[in-house]
Image (cartoon, rainbow, N blue to C red):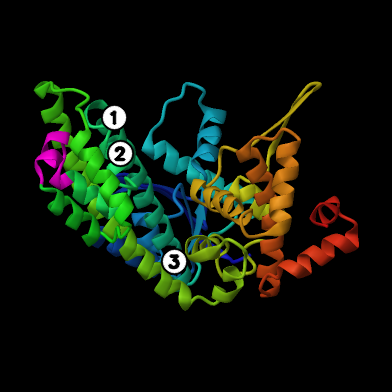
Amino acid sequence: MDTIAAYIGLDWADERHAVHLQSADGKIEHLELEQKPAVLHEWVAQRQQRFGGGKIAVALEQRKGAVVHALLMYDCFVLYPINPKALARYREAFSTSGAKDDPLDSELLLDLVVRHRAKLRAWVPDTVESRTLQALCEQRRKLVNQRVALTNRLTSLLKQYFPQALEWVGDVASVQACDFLVQWPTLAAVQRARPSTVRRFYQDHNCRKRAVIEARLAAIADARPLTTDAAVIEPLSLSVQTYATQLRALIAAIQTFDARIGEVFAQHADHDLFGSFPGAGDVCAPRLAAAFGTDRSRWDSAAELQAHSGIAPVTERSGKSIWVHHRLACPKFVKQTFHEFADQSIRFSRWARAYYDQLRGRGKDHHAALRALAYKWIRILFRCWKERRPYEEETYIEALRRRGSPLAKNLA
């Protein structure tokens, strides 16, 4: 373990940051820093000069964010991210009132890193390429969540005054649907349009099936409004146009992210490895690579990653009672990554499909079965990752047969 010249507890806030520092002589100092880059960098330069470039252990509640981005520029800092729940429990050990104060938190962070540094794991940043891929995947997922929210709003609004549009626009989360609703947000608007105009609209949006287009034109001509109340139609149709415009911009943004993720992932050291897994595809493969990273020393066993991701269940005991439930305190994006990959894998992997069907046959619901499948996939992913070896479906199935696994019988 590195020799530490000083310890710091840092509680980052929007305007001012509370800092507690303990030097080698045991003396503790407290100060506050303004939320200004120049102030932070000047303070860091002073610490470097004071401690001769020695290592400084910093405990903070964040693993990413403005403070982490700033401190990563300096080699003298060894960062120890503290889970907010862990800090809250530590705070409650000394104060049960529930009171929270930034200076107190920075002091508690300092106490944690001074007394328990041997039990804390220093955060070692991955390569720039790997962290870029991770950030791109996370931001893309946030955009996808916004897209889902907007499509749900559009669907809800249309059901209130213009339900026929849900049949005529195609996929609500498509450019065609957005353009249709911006141009014709009401039944009266689309019925006023010439059939040739509507036909050309579908053709311009790559709807080439003549029978589908003609059926929609006939339905538009014969449709009757759900309501003619202007007090309902006008405000809701304006909202639909607004959301449709936002949705179209989101769709374009997601496509931009997809293109950039593809470029970055193509240069990733483990591109072929994660691309070999059935169902990973263009979306899940980069996310799997981001979840594992490139530092092979980061995880000592698959069990560590299963617990960290939240895929491993939690066992609780109290007296004679024992119960097992899925883990809630975990990085949601990582858990979601393995969950969604497991869902895709049952469409492309024979053994994954057999295992999923086996669990469903035992009464497990869809998501519980996917978590159990993801638990098995993490062990396989971890082994391939450690050995830098792409996955081979037939090799794994043959291993199941050699071990006499019931799954092998189901596959046969």
Amino acid bearing label 3? Leu
Amino acid bearing label 2? Leu
Q: Which residue is disc 3 drawn over?
A: 133
| Camera sees residue 240 | yes
Q: Earlier in the sequence, mark 1 or mark 2?
A: 1
Name the spot of residue 167 as percent of width and height, x first.
31, 40
| Residue 3: quarter of image | bottom right
Instruction: Report whether 314 appears left or right of 217.
Output: right
Is label 2 in contact with label 3 (beta carbons under 8 Å)? no
Residue at 25%, 60% (x, y): give it: 37
Give the magenta range.
Answer: 182-193
Compared with residue 223, is residue 66 higher up or lower down, i.e. above or below?
below
Which of these two is toward me, 284 or 228? 228
Which of these two is toward me, 44 or 80? 80
Residue at 74%, 37% (x, y): give it: 361
Q: Earlier in the sequence, mark 2 or mark 3?
A: 3
Report how far apart the C-alphas of labels 2 and 3 lie in the structure: 36 Å
Q: Is residue 188 magenta?
A: yes
Which of these two is toward me, 282 or 154? 154
Name the spot of residue 283 as percent of width and height, x first.
47, 61
Q: Earlier in the sequence, mark 1 or mark 3?
A: 3
Residue at 13%, 36% (x, y): give it: 238
Image mark for residue 166: 2
Q: Which residue is disc 1 drawn over?
A: 159
Q: Is residue 142 magenta?
A: no
Depth-wise, is mark 1 or mark 3 nearer the camera? 1
Neighbour class for label 2 at 10 Å: few (<14), some, many (≥20)? some
Q: Main secondary structure of the magenta part?
A: helix
Amino acid bearing label 1? Lys
Depth-wise, is mark 2 or mark 3 nearer the camera? 2
Helix, strand or loop at mark 2: helix
